[in-house]
Image (cartoon, grey):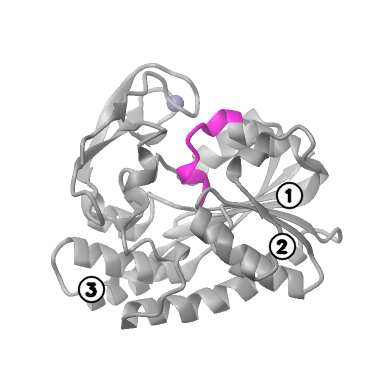
């Protein structure tokens, strides 16, 4: 496809203008086009640059690998993924339940609404935002209150006690603008629950340019714990803690093996090692709990 690119001249996290190349890789799952990750010389944040324009980036979400947006049930990998996702949904609900007594939740990038559906069954008042019309359709068919992502900036939007973003923040085109809006939508003492991949994990270092969680170009940002700490500080949130997502090490390592042209099941060993070797803050993907002061 014809590339329409947007070259960022500032670090999306701290605004600094000097960068250096961190790695060169490509879109393995769909377009096969080359992309590059840069590192900010001031804060060290890693971000994809250049990125597809806001108008064209939707074209890169058409991969079959992007299974979170469809409910088809083909292939063993997909079956395992769905089984894990079911268990993961339960544990996610348990995590958010422990954070608040006000069961009022906004899930940004809610996909087909499985997490919100589970929350709703467990007494939560739920709202989802999702850019993909097909995924929104599926939410509505499950009786989930969902709107297009633009609604985030609707001035009449009600405040909530919990905002969740499960592997979503790395896709948000206007990071600072939209994050600020999300913080505004939180009640005092409300919590932001953010799950993102972590490029200082063992599996990230092992696979480097083949690491599937770089997911170029649709992952615009590549977070490590320090970056989330800085983001929290910029928006006056309290960084409470991190929770590992151990299943992700397996899934991401399997995909990474397949990107290398190897047998994906080899990734199970890397996933296991990644979890074994990880100290606090070094898991393949992590959940960050940030609280509004
Ligand atoms: Zn920076």
| Residue drawn at x 43%, y 66% as measured from the top left | 248
Instruction: Give the prevailing secondary structure in the magenta stretch.
Output: helix
Query: Looking at the image, in which quadrant does ligand 1 appear?
Result: top left
**Mark closest to the chain's N terminus, 2 or 3:** 2
Q: What segment is highlighted magenta in the picture?
A: 168-177
Residue at the disc numbered 1: 191
Residue at the disc numbered 3: 264
Residue 89 x, y percent position in the rendering: 60, 72
283 w.r.t. 149: above or below: below
Asked whether residue 280 is in view, the answer is no
Residue at the disc numbered 2: 96
Say if mark 1 contacts mark 2, CB within 8 Å: yes
Q: Is mark 2 within 8 Å of ligand 1?
A: no
Count every numbered label the image shows and give the total.
Answer: 3
Q: Quadrant of residue 188?
A: top right
Residue 56 x, y percent position in the rendering: 35, 37
In the foreground, 166 or 43: 166
């Amino acid at each position: 496809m014809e590339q329409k690119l947007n070259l960022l001249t500032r670090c999306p996290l701290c605004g600094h203008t000097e960068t250096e190349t961190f790695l060169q890789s490509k879109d393995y799952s769909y377009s096969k086009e080359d992309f590059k990750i840069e590192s900010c010389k001031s804060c060290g944040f890693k971000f994809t640059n250049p990125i597809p324009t806001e108008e064209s980036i939707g074209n890169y979400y058409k991969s079959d690998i992007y299974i979170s947006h469809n409910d088809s049930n083909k292939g063993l990998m997909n079956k395992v993924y769905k089984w894990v996702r079911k268990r993961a949904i339960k544990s996610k609900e348990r995590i958010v339940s422990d954070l608040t007594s006000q069961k009022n939740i906004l899930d940004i990038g809610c996909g087909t609404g499985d997490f919100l559906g589970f929350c709703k069954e467990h007494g939560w008042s739920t709202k989802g935002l999702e850019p993909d019309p097909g995924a929104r359709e599926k939410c509505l068919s499950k009786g989930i209150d969902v709107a297009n992502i633009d609604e985030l900036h609707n001035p009449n939007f009600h405040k909530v006690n919990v905002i969740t973003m499960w592997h979503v923040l790395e896709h948000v085109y206007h990071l600072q603008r939209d994050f600020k809006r999300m913080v505004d939508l939180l009640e005092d003492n409300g919590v932001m629950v953010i799950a993102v991949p972590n490029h200082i994990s063992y599996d990230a270092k092992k696979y480097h340019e083949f690491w599937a969680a770089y997911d170029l170009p649709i992952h615009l940002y590549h977070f490590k714990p320090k970056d989330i700490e800085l983001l929290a500080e910029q928006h006056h949130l309290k960084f409470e803690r991190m929770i590992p997502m151990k299943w992700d090490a397996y899934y991401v390592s399997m995909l990474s093996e397949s990107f290398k042209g190897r047998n994906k099941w080899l990734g199970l060993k890397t996933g296991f090692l990644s979890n074994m070797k990880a100290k606090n803050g070094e898991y393949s993907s992590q959940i960050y709990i940030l609280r509004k002061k």
